[in-house]
Image (spheres, helix red, strand yellow):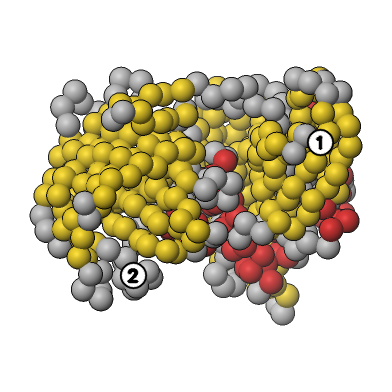
Amino acid sequence: MKTNRLLNRVAGLFCLTSILWGQYAWNTGEISFSYGSPIPDQQLSLTGDLLPDAVPDQGVGGFEISQGDTNLIMLVAQNTYVLEEDTLADIFILFMNDTLPMEPGTYLVNPSPEALKLFVWMREIDPDVLPGLINADFTIDSLASLNPFISISGQFDIVEINAFQLQMNFAGMMFSPSFETMSILNGAIHTISTFPVSVYSQGALDYVEGGESGNISGELNPLINSEGVGAVRTEVQDTITYNLISYHEMEENRYDVFGVTLVGDEASFLATTADLEFPISILENEFPMAVPFMLKNVAVQDVLELLESGEMPSPDSLSQIYLPISQGTAYLNFTDVGDASLDFENITMSNITGDFTQLSENWILGNSSTNSIDGKFVIQIPDSPIVGAPYPNPFNSSTIIPVNLTRPMQLDLEIYNILGQNVAYIRLGEYSSGSHHIPLNMGLYKLSGGLYYFSFRGNTQILDTGSFLYLK
């Protein structure tokens, strides 16, 4: 089914975007509410992954992103089924945007475009409409031909919102263009992310491998930076997995990777003043456990797949991976300011071809610039960004990128695909100091839809970088 292929592509892109650029994406969940006209005398409940695997199917999910000065939440519940010989879908959308952050609290239904808050129910429609709805270009006008029920009064109550889940209650009165009414009561939606979530975007690693020492530091984003350090976290039921990943480019588009996978439950990662001990093991029955790993001369796509999977890598997927064959302990510590450190010493590592090496590592992880100087770690506060978030993002034609220049300069824009290939170089011309809004029409460049990142150059020097999702 075309819908399935498109949604899987969108989900993969949102997964990487949530890791590399800190946007939230919840791919599974449940929704329930009472409905009827005029009395809510029927009940609807849907649960499962947003992505349909077959027909019939149902699912719930959504995302939160920032578009310039606007914060946006879109939650989608779908029920796909066969009626006679037609494949149809009922789709329920909750949409909120505001210039203020979306925090726990009560929000009233609001038709104002600057602070739009509403829920929409479309029934017996073509399911191929669904991928286009998972798009920040959402407007009420775009739904008019589907004869939707649209909320005209009511409220949302956000109970909890973070990278791992969103819980919200809702109720209100709906009205359709054909003058039908619908009451919604006791609405509740709970969306969950089983995607890896970035918990530490930057860091530094000091290591000794085979008698040779080295250091890697920087922001975790292999699409932009030639080296970087960070960690992603995945929660599946009661199991929590942290993947610490560092990489550095050895030659063009080839990387060495050092990583550690930590597996445990919530108690395993409780912040205390003492070090948390993780026995180093590759046995699946160890809990908690730490598994150091090492890769040599891999492509950037391998690094991205490590981030996207959120799982412990294995020789089945990466044949040349080095894994531990000796025992030891990794010591994890959380600082008062939210940073983390991890270290272990003298672990023997081997790959399937029988190569051996000895490995010791000392990590520090945080969410500001991190460097290692003379064996001591220094946290640096990043400079104010030059480039703002593109808006809209995602988009299916054009977007606008805010830029703030401290002095006049010649400005150029470079666009790269997910493989790091330069696909467009745009000479923008001379710009004065101050704030500017740079329009970008992706339709001019005959590029396929997908995740792209960009960099602005001022007088040939890279000023700042960012990313966007192009939904073609």
Q: Position of residue 223 (x, y in %)?
A: 57, 51
Location of the N terminus by quadrant is bottom right
Above or below, 311 relative to 276 = below
What's under tag 2, amino acid-wise?
Answer: Gln
Q: Residues within 10 Å of mark 1 (few under 14, many from 20)?
A: many
Q: Which callout, 2 or 1, points to the residue nearer the camera?
A: 1
The spot of residue 398 in percent (x, y) is 84, 47
Would you identify the image quadrant in which residue 294 lies? bottom left
* Left-right relation of 283 to 17: left
Residue at left 46%, top 56%?
A: 250
Q: CA distance from mark 2 to mark 1?
A: 43 Å
- Towards the viewer: 102 or 457: 457
> Could you tell me if residue 175 is visible in this image?
no
Identify residue type, mark 1.
Answer: Leu
Residue 290 rendering spot, x and y as whole percentages: 22, 50
Q: Residue at x 60, y 39 (%)?
A: 64
Q: Are marks 2 and 1 in contact (CB under 8 Å)?
A: no
Task: Tell me which numbered mark, 2 or 1, is placed earlier along the sequence.
Answer: 2
Q: Secondary structure at mark 1?
A: strand
The residue at the point 40 percent across, 57 percent down is 256
Measured from the top left, where is residue 219 in percent x and y?
Answer: 49, 38
The residue that disc 1 covers is 411
- Residue located at (16% from left, 45% from top): 345
Q: Residue furthest front?
A: 212
Looking at the rendered structure, the number of numbered marks drawn on it comes to 2
The residue carrying pointer 2 sits among few (fewer than 14), some (14 to 19) or many (20 or more) residues within 10 Å by Cα, namely some
Q: Image height check: is 70 above or below 57? A: above
Q: Quadrant of the C terminus?
A: bottom right
Considering every residue shown, the one lying at the far bottom of the view is 85
- Name the residue beneath numbered marker 2: 320
